[in-house]
Amino acid sequence: MNASKDSYLAESAVDCVGAADGSEALPASETLSTGHADAQPEATRKPVLSKNALKKELKFKKRAELLKQRRPDEKEQRKRKKLAARRRLNQQMTMPGEEIPSNKVARRRILEKLSNALTNGVKLVVDMSFVDIMSPKEIGQLASQICYMYSSNKKFANPFCLNLCSFVKGTTLYDEVLKRCSGFEHYKIRTHEEPLEKVFAKEDIVYCSPDSPNVLEKIDPAKVYVIGGLVDGSPKTRASMDRAEGIGCQTVRLPIKEHMKRIVPHGSSTILTLNQVYEILMKLHETGSWEVALKNSIPQRKGFVLNTEAGKQGDAGTAQEIESEHPEDSTSSSS
Ligand SMILES: C[S@@+](CC[C@H](N)C(=O)[O-])C[C@H]1O[C@@H](n2cnc3c(N)ncnc32)[C@H](O)[C@@H]1O
């Protein structure tokens, strides 16, 4: 064995232990084998760490220490964010001429608003009939998206009347939703075990699908808007389009390429998550503006900017038309 190399490693180990946990450095003999290791019997000899392994160990310990220090901060930050969100929500529930209501009053008003939406709101359905083509992880993610969507629905002045179709008791998806969405049994949401074509007239159904050749123009309160309860961990091409064709209902896609440009060379696709589609529909319903709806609901990392902003941001040179992801796209319009 190379004695000089070993003693160098032993020294590094002492540095490493002392520096990483801030404690007294342990004697090398307690951490690693030393230059005298050859004197020990083979069975009791501790393994000698390579220089790289030592570096890794040091890095790991430093990171663990940093995380430990950061944790209270993050907890505090989360608490502050939650409080700020609550305050914003309460503020929205303020009646003209009054102060921000207490949590209790705001909560009661939100519940009234959501109950009212169940009878008067525009109907929005999540079609939960795709469980067979999703992995357990994707099913869990879909369940979480349902909780976010419900939470988000509270923020709006005229929330949607939310429906879950093909939502069958005893299935993994049902159990996941119950597990992840706390208080789900009190949610102001309509659940149906039947598939959506049994619950609504097919003439009223407008199925959102990225593969549709038709473009959505505006929200028609008499229609029932459907989003596929799908999480695309692995791409499921045309799943929602095939489903809609099976029902024989109208289909629409969001007019992303009509209103936006791509500012990153190999940008992401125009297929969005259930929550993003929900937000876009809701904002379109509230403001009537596609620009507002798209700008505020599509995350920046997707690399899309509004046509009207492509020049302003200095990306006039890089902004590209979003090419059609569907060759058969005939871009006919629909409401
Ligand atoms: C993650 S996407 C699933 C995409 C999937 N490949 C499919 O066949 O629909 C979840 C749902 O959001 C809706 N969606 C996503 N992007 C859309 C777009 N650009 N236009 C219309 N609907 C969209 C669809 O209802 C879709 O089923």
Image (tube, grey):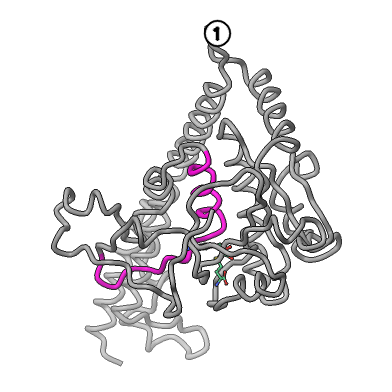
Check the image and report above or below for 270 versus 110: below
Report the image quarter containing ligand 1. Answer: bottom right
Residue 256 left/right relative to 161: left
Check the image and report above or below for 44 versus 156: below
How many numbered markers are drawn?
A: 1
Q: Residue at x 22, y 54 (%)?
A: 310
Residue 5 left/right relative to 86: left
Q: Nearer the viewer, residue 263 or 23?
A: 263
Q: Residue at x 36, y 51 (%)?
A: 22
Q: Nearer the viewer, residue 56 or 236?
A: 236
Q: Check residue 116 for magenta coloring.
A: no
Residue 48 left/right relative to 122: left
Q: Amino acid at mark 1?
A: Glu
Position of the N terminus by quadrant: bottom left
Q: Position of residue 246 (x, y in %)?
A: 70, 75
Residue segment shown in magenta: 264-285
Q: Nearer the viewer, residue 106 or 329?
A: 329
Quarter of the image where one finds residue 188? top right
Q: Position of residue 66 (x, y in %)?
A: 38, 51
Q: Which residue is mark 1?
A: 98
Badge 1 element: loop
Check the image and report above or below for 309 versus 134: above
Q: Nearer the viewer, residue 109 or 125?
A: 125
Q: Residue at x 52, y 58 (%)?
A: 334
